[in-house]
Amino acid sequence: MADSACPTDSRRCNYFFLYDGSKVQEEGDPTRAGICFFYPEETPLEQQELLCGQLAGVCQCVSELSRSPVRLLRLRGSKFAVRMKDHFLWAFSCPPDIPDVSVCKLLDQLISLFCFYNGPIRQSYQLHSRADLALRWARYLTHLQGGSSELHHIFSCLRTIDSTHIDPLLLLKAALILQACQRCPLVLAGCILYRGRVVSTQMPPDLTVKVMVHETESYSQQDHRPVANGISSACGTPSSSTGTTPVFLTPAELQALCCPPVNRTCRSHCTPQPPPRPRKSRLLSRTLSDTPPSELDAAKLDPAPTPFLCLSDESCLSPCPSSSQATTPEFSPLHQSENPCTTDAESHDHDLSNEIASCELEEEVVRGKMANGCSKKVELRMDQSKVEARGDLILQNGNGCHTNGYHQEPASDHHSDQSSGDEPPDTSHLKPLSNGAEMPDKEEKKKKEKANIKKDNQERDENRQANMKNSGRKIEVKDREGVGDGEMRENGMGRGESGEGESSEEEQVLLPRALYQHRVRALVLALLVEPHFHSDQAAVEEVSHSSLASLNGLEAHLRTSTPGGPGPHGPYTFAHYDCIQNTLTTNLSGRSVAPQDRSFVRATALLHSHFSQTQTLQEAIVRSAGAAVYSTRSPAQETYFLQHATSVRNSGIPNHLDSAFSLPNKARHRLLKHGVNLL
Amino acid sequence: MASKSSLLKVILLGDGGVGKSSLMNRYVTNKFDTHLFHTIGVEFLNKDLEVDGHMVTMQIWDTAGQERFRSLRTPFYRGSDCCLLTFSVDDSQSFHNLGNWKKEFIYYADVKEPESFPFVVLGNKVDVTERQVSSEEAKQWCLENGNYSYYETSAKDSTNVASAFEEAVRRVLAMEERGEHLIPTDTVNLHRKPRSGASCC
C-alpha cells in the first residue's frame, strides 16, 4: 500500500520519517530502534539510520542552542520540515521549489491527521505495533499527497466541489441537511462530501481535511461494490452504509465546534443549564435559531463518561497542570506581552534567528496552521520571542483570524473577558502543586511562562463557556489537585525530563469523540458526534431519518448535474485562495502541464511563500522575460493573476508603459465574473 | 423474495406546503415533523411493502413545490410509475393548481399515454377544521380528469396515508398487468422464430 503511495506525485515527498529518540539513549542503542516509520519504505536501513541519526542530532543541537524547536532544515538540495515533540521527531522532506510554508503545513497536517484517528502519538505506539501504524502513516501520506493539483498542494487547501457547475440551491440543500442533523444534541458538526470533495462543511478547514481521509478510505473500499443503497430499505434500521469510527479532537477544535461564531453572543448570555442532558431534540437547527447552551458543554464537565475524557478535559480547561504555583505575581506582565502593543517587534529579520546559516526557523509562518489552535500558538509565540521576535506578525494573526478565523478572537475581546472577574479564584487554586520545586531554574521559569499563557487561553475558553463556569470550575480544580502530574502519564505522555518536549503538552491532550459516516453511493455525510452516539439507538435513528431522504435526493442531483469541462479558459490564468475557508478557486485545469501554466504555478508558489513570510506585503508582481504574474492579498484571501498573450513591454527600468502595471486593473475586471472581488 | 420484489417509482407533486414531505415521512418512518424546511429539489425514500401478494419496493420521490425549484425537480419526473397529485384541503389554490401539476408531469415525464397513466389524488391536511376544498369538489375533479382515485389524508395524524400509497401501488400493478397482455402482440420472441430472414449481412 505504501509503495503505491505516489508513483506520480512522488516529487512532493522525498522522505518522511518519525523517529523516537527515547528508544536511542545509550551509546549502544542502534539508531534503527528509534525509527518508527520511514518513507519511502524501501529505503535501505543503513540509509534510513544515517538520515534519522544525523537529522535527529542536528535538530537536537539546534533546538538546544536556540532554545526553540526546529521547524525547517535545509540539507543540500532538499529541505526538511521538522517537528519535535517529547522524544519524537518528525521530518518531512520535499524538493526545494515547494514553499517552506507549504512543507511545514503539510507536515503539521500529517501529524494532526495521525493524532485525529489514533490519539496521542506516544499512546498509539504503546497500543499498536509499528507495522500497523506504519500502514496508517503511509495511508495519510498518500492521502495528503494524492489527488489534487499542484496549486492545491501549494496552499494545502481543501478540495471542494466545483460550485460553478452545480445549482447553488444544492449547496443550500447540503447545508440544511447538516443543520437538520445538528438537531440531535449528540451531533457536534458535520460535513458533506461528494466523490472526495467538500460540498458543505460546518467544521473548520483543518478538521474537514481530517474527516475526509476516512471518507476517501471507505470510498475506495466500497468502490467496486454493487450499489445497493438506493434500493435497500430505508425504513427501520439505517442502511448498511453507515459506520462510526473513534477520533480524537484537540481542545481547540472541540471548542470551535461547540461555539460556532454565529452563536457566541447568544451563548454568553445564557444562564447555566443543569447537567442532565436533554434527550429531546432541538426543534430548530443551531444556525437558524437561538439555541440553548451546547449540551456538549454539559457533557464535557460531566465526570461520568470516561476517565480519559475527564482527565483530558481537566487539563484542557484548568489553568495548568504543574509548576504554576507562582503564576499569580507574574501573570500580568506576561499576559501583557501577548498584547500587540508590547511585543518586541524590533527584529524582523528571521534569518538572524539561529545564527546557523543552514538552518532556518520559520515557525511564524506555520504557527497559524498548527492543529491545536490558539493555545499552542501562544506558547510558541513565547518560545520564540526569546530568539527571534516577529511578534507583530503573529499578533496580526491573532487579531485578524488569518488562519484560524473560526475560533480566534481579537485581543481586545480577550482582555474584556479577563476583566470579567473570574480569574482570581483560579490562580488561588494553583498553589498546592509541588512538583515545580524539583525543576531546574530555567526550566521552571520557562514552564511558568508557558503556563501563564496557557492559562490565559484557557481563561478565554472558559469565558466562552460562561454558562458552565461555576459548576465546571469546581470539578476541574478537584481533578487537578487529585491527579497532578500523573495525568500526563495517564495519557500516555510520560514527559521527558529534558526540555525537549517543550513544544506543548496542550497538544497531547486529545478528547475522544466519534466520526459517524453515512454513505449514499458517492455522497457521504460525515458527522462528529459524542462518543456514545452509536450506542444511542434513538439518536442514530433520529439522524438517519432526518437526513436519509435529503441525502438520497442530493446524491441524485449531484450525479445528474453535468460536470462540465473547465469551460472557456479565457486569456488569463488565475488562482484565488480563501485563507479562511482554506479553499481555492482557479481556472487552471487539474494537472495541466502547459509551459505557461507551469510558470504560473511556480510564480504562485514563490509569491505565496513571500506573502506568508512578509505580513505587510500586499501586492507583488513577479516576472520573467515572457510573463508577469500579479498577486494581491488581504487577511482573508490571496489572488494570483496571469494575463496571456501580451507582449511584456519591459524596458528594465520603471516605466509607465510597462505592461505589468496594467495587470492589477485587468485582474480586478476579469476576476469579477469568477466571484473574486478585488475592488 | 427479494428477487421477486420490483422497484416502483412513485412521485409526489403539488404546491409548496401542502405536505408532500410530511406524507412521505409519515409513511416511511412514521414520524411527523412540524419544522420541516422547504424541500429543495427532490428527495426520496424507499419502502418495502406487500400489496395483494406482490412484494414491491416503492421508491417515493418527494419534490419541491415552489416554482423556483422547478428546474431542479423536473428532470426527475422521468421513469415514474405513478404520480400522486397532492393538494391541501385548507388551500383552494393548491387544489386549483392540480391541473397544472398534471400537465407539468406529463410534459417532463414524457408520458406516452397520458390518458391511462396512473394518477392518484391526495387531499392532505384533513385534520384541519377550516376546509376550503370540499370532498365533493375534489371527487368531481378526479372523475372529470380520468377517474383518478381520491384519498383524503392527514400526515399529521396518519389518516389514510398508508392506504393512499398502497392504492398507488395497486394502480401501477394493474397497469402492468394490462401491459403484460400487450407484450405478445408487439414483441418478437427470438427463441421461437429460428430467424428465417437473417440475411442482413
Image (spheres, coloured by chain):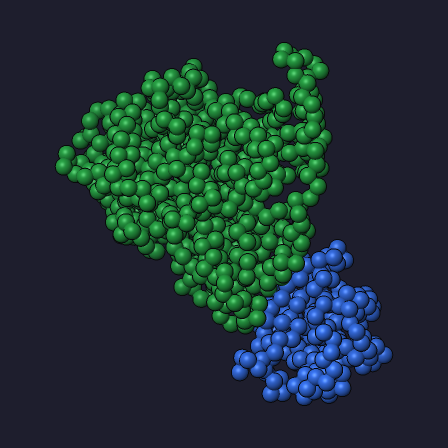
Identify the hue of chain B: blue
Left or right of residue A237, residue A127 in this image: left
From this view, report whether residue B98 is shown above or below residue B176: above
From this view, report whether residue A272 is shown above or below residue A102: below
Q: Position of residue A568 (x, y in %)?
A: 70, 41
Residue visible at 61% across and 32% down?
A: A596
Residue visible at 82% across and 68% down?
A: B103
Question: In green, which chain?
Answer: A
Nearer-the-camera pick, A601 or A640: A601
Q: Does residue A564 appear in this view?
A: yes
Residue visible at 69% across and 44% down?
A: A567
On the rendered image, what quadrant is the C terminus of chain A found in? top right
Nearer-the-camera pick, A250 or A670: A670
Label count reads: 0
Nearer-the-camera pick, A307 or A352: A352
Q: Position of residue B108 (x, y in %)?
A: 77, 65
Q: Position of residue A535 (x, y in %)?
A: 40, 64
Nearer-the-camera pick, A115 or A89: A89
Left or right of residue A130, residue A401 in this image: right
Q: Does residue A467 appear in this view?
A: no
Q: Residue furthest top?
A: A653
Q: Position of residue A109 (x, y in %)?
A: 42, 40
Would you identify the image quadrant in which residue B60 lies? bottom right
Residue visible at 35% across and 51% down?
A: A135
Would you identify the image quadrant in which residue A477 lies? top left
